[in-house]
């Protein structure tokens, strides 16, 4: 959606730019009987397509034509929820229910009758989420004239097949089902998209619109932005004896000429110039000191190299770690069982660079890396996909080349080393949110344990079995093994008890991993039998082991009964070792009875909070 928090702050056109395009498409969206039902707005990389689309939408809403905005979708390369064609139609259906008068009741009825379509193929989604609801809506009193669906960044959908499938959906809606809608699609002029608009049935109802260059608009844009920079850095500029007007007309004209219509080039120059505590005039002169070249990519590459070259030496290691963390998430973040976010605090935990140093390092390359404030912390990201493309192209980036696969491997190694440090210290690192990378690595190990023979993962789980002491701190590691055993029991339902599992493992010593699991299980049960745990921990451990692995973990009351403990005493043990019993707390939380005083905690104001909420806020100390 155009106002989604995932795109905050959304790109917008400067008030003095793109006025002709915006006026044209606002008028087209308000025209009752347009000649063209589909427009393809196209331009090369960096010319501001993604700023034009939200500006058009905002204009329609501001002028009271929200009912003409049926829905919007902004594809984003590598952005979870925005990178696949499967997400398009459910999002559009949801927005139609909100934006089109009378549509909410229709879609609600459709979803109550069959809630499955959002998870099915796009053709089924089209029929049940778009076609049927719209046909019913058209026969009602609310339809006046065709509303518009806005689709931006089609070329950033994750596959060519997905991109073309999106265009085929438009053809089916307009030509096969004759639904009165109109579509505005924006993308780069990729050959397969160009051919689809020109050589298929879509050509009969569509028109191409190329975003034009406008040097006067770019000049006005630069003048306005440089004036803002001067006002922000007025003390530095005046101390250096630099007066307005700044920059000179010649400098602005040179920047516009070098940009060749690429707003992303101008924005990179502006970010490079506007750095806290540094003289903007000196920064701009450094950017302009290079001999002119008409190639936009050469200009962009020069700016990217200049930004990295001017990074202070003492921060380069931190900057490299941040870059690799972003590349790691871009390549692997959405392939793991849980969505991974690399926050600054998490990067600090993994790399052992101090948080203040990472923040200063990010500031030194703010022209290419931005810090996004998320509820789970501050997350670094590239300003533009072009910087990622620059880094992974050795011919363009030279000494700054960063191979995505190698960056991913290096980052995984960093994570594993951090995990080993936590085992050596007999602790499990837990950040301020459940998306902590180390926590995700643990979950990744758990979720894939029965099927993996990875030596690296084997080493993680087997690490420390001969060195860690039998005590509360090491209990967390053993509880995870028990948790994995329960998963094995679930996948092998014919087993009745741990003895059968040990026998099965003994008969299948196919890998060191299964042999290692057998060894760990034997050590765990031997440790319990020998009384190596403290009395209270031993009773808890026994009660956890002595449960039906095909059922979910017991409630606090049942756990306390098995351990021959009072429920409050049992809960107190869990509270005292909260970081070690996270899995226990999370598993128990679903079965908590709110009416029982044993299942609540008290905050600073004395308010009761159900223990189940610890699932979402386990990082807070239990009161």
Image (spheres, grey):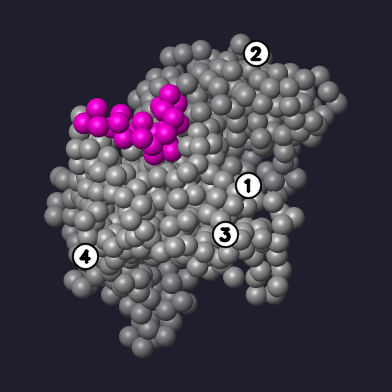
Q: Is disc 3 placed on a helix, strand or loop?
A: loop
**In the drawing, what numbered circle is on residue 591?**
1
Q: Which of the two marks, 3 or 2, is nearer to us in this view? A: 3
Residue 5 visible in this rendered orientation of the protein:
no
Viewer-proximal residue, 579 or 181? Answer: 579
Which residue appears at 66% of the width and 14% of the height? 178
Q: Which residues are magenta?
A: 485-509
Viewer-proximal residue, 287 or 176? Answer: 176
Q: Which of the two marks, 4 or 1, is nearer to us in this view? A: 1
Whether the residues at callouts 2 and 1 have beta carbons within 8 Å, the answer is no
Q: CA distance from mark 3 to mark 4?
A: 52 Å
Label 3: few (<14), some (14–19) or many (≥20) C-alpha neighbours in 10 Å: some
Mark 4 vs mark 2: which is more N-terminal? 2
Placement of 474 over or under 607, stated as above or below: above
**In the drawing, what numbered circle is on residue 317?**
4
Q: CA distance from mark 1 to mark 3?
A: 19 Å
Residue at the disc numbered 2 = 177
* Location of residue 262 in the rendering, given as x and y in whole percent from the top left corner: 37, 48
**In the drawing, what numbered circle is on residue 565?**
3
Mark 4 vs mark 1: which is more N-terminal? 4
Residue 51 visible in this rendered orientation of the protein:
yes
**In the drawing, what numbered circle is on residue 429?**
none
* Location of residue 297 in the rendering, given as x and y in whole percent from the top left corner: 26, 47
Q: CA distance from mark 3 to mark 2?
A: 67 Å
Whether the residues at callouts 3 and 4 have beta carbons within 8 Å, the answer is no
Q: CA distance from mark 4 to mark 2?
A: 58 Å
Q: CA distance from mark 4 to mark 1?
A: 47 Å
Mark 1 vs mark 3: which is more N-terminal? 3
User: Residue 64's quadrant in the figure?
Assistant: top right
Q: Is disc 1 placed on a helix, strand or loop?
A: loop
């Amino acid at each position: 959606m155009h106002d989604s928090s995932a795109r905050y702050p959304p790109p917008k056109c400067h008030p003095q730019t793109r006025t002709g395009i915006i006026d044209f498409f606002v008028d087209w969206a308000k025209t009752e009987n347009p000649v063209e039902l589909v427009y393809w707005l196209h331009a090369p990389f960096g010319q501001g397509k993604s700023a034009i689309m939200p500006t058009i939408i905002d204009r329609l809403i501001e002028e009271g034509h929200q009912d003409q905005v049926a829905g919007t979708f902004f594809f984003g390369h590598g952005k979870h929820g925005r990178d696949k064609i499967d997400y398009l139609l459910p999002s559009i259906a949801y927005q139609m229910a909100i934006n089109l008068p009378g549509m909410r009741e229709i879609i609600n009825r459709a979803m109550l009758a069959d809630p499955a379509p959002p998870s099915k193929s796009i053709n089924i989604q089209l029929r049940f989420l778009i076609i049927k609801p719209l046909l019913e809506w058209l026969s009602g009193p609310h339809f006046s004239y065709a509303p518009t669906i806005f689709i931006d960044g089609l070329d950033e959908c994750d596959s060519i097949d997905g991109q073309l499938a999106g265009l085929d959906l438009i053809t089916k809606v307009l030509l096969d089902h004759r639904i009165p809608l109109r579509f505005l699609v924006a993308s780069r002029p990729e050959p397969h998209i160009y051919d689809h608009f020109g050589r298929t049935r879509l050509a009969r109802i569509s028109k191409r619109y190329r975003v034009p260059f406008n040097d006067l608009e770019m000049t006005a844009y630069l003048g306005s932005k440089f004036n803002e920079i001067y006002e922000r850095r007025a003390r530095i500029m005046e101390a250096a004896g630099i007066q307005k007007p700044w920059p000179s007309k010649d400098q602005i004209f040179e920047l516009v000429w070098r940009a060749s219509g690429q707003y992303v080039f101008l924005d990179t120059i502006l970010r490079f110039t506007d750095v806290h505590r540094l003289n903007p005039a000196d920064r701009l002169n450094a950017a302009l000191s290079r001999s002119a070249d008409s190639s936009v990519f050469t200009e962009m590459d020069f700016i990217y190299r200049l930004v990295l070259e001017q990074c202070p030496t003492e921060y380069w290691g931190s900057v490299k770690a941040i870059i690799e963390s972003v590349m790691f998430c871009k390549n692997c973040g959405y392939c793991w069982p849980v969505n991974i976010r690399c926050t600054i605090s998490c990067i600090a935990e993994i790399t052992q660079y101090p948080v203040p140093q990472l923040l200063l390092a990010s500031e030194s390359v703010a022209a290419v890396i931005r810090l996004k404030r998320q509820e789970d912390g501050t997350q670094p990201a590239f300003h533009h996909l072009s910087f990622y493309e620059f880094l992974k192209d050795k011919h363009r980036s030279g000494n700054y080349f960063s191979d995505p696969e190698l960056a991913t491997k290096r980052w995984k190694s960093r994570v594993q080393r951090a995990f080993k440090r936590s085992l050596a210290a007999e602790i499990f690192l837990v950040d301020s949110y459940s998306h902590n990378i180390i926590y995700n690595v643990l979950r990744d190990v758990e979720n894939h344990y029965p099927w993996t023979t990875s030596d690296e993962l084997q080493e993680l789980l087997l690490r420390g079995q001969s060195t860690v002491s039998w005590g509360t701190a090491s209990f967390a590691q053993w509880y995870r093994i028990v948790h994995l055993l329960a998963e094995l029991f679930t996948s092998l339902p014919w087993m009745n008890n741990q003895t059968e599992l040990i026998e099965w493992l003994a008969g299948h010593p196919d890998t060191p991993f299964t042999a290692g699991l057998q060894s760990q299980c034997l050590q765990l049960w031997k440790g319990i039998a020998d009384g190596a745990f403290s009395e209270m921990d031993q009773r808890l451990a026994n009660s956890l082991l002595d449960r039906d692995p095909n059922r979910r973990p017991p409630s606090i009351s049942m756990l306390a009964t098995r351990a021959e403990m009072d429920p409050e005493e049992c809960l107190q043990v869990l509270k005292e070792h909260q970081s070690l019993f996270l899995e226990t707390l999370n598993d128990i939380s679903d079965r908590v009875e709110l009416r029982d005083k044993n299942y609540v905690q008290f905050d600073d104001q004395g308010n009761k909070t159900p223990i189940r909420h610890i699932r979402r806020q386990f990082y807070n100390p239990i009161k």
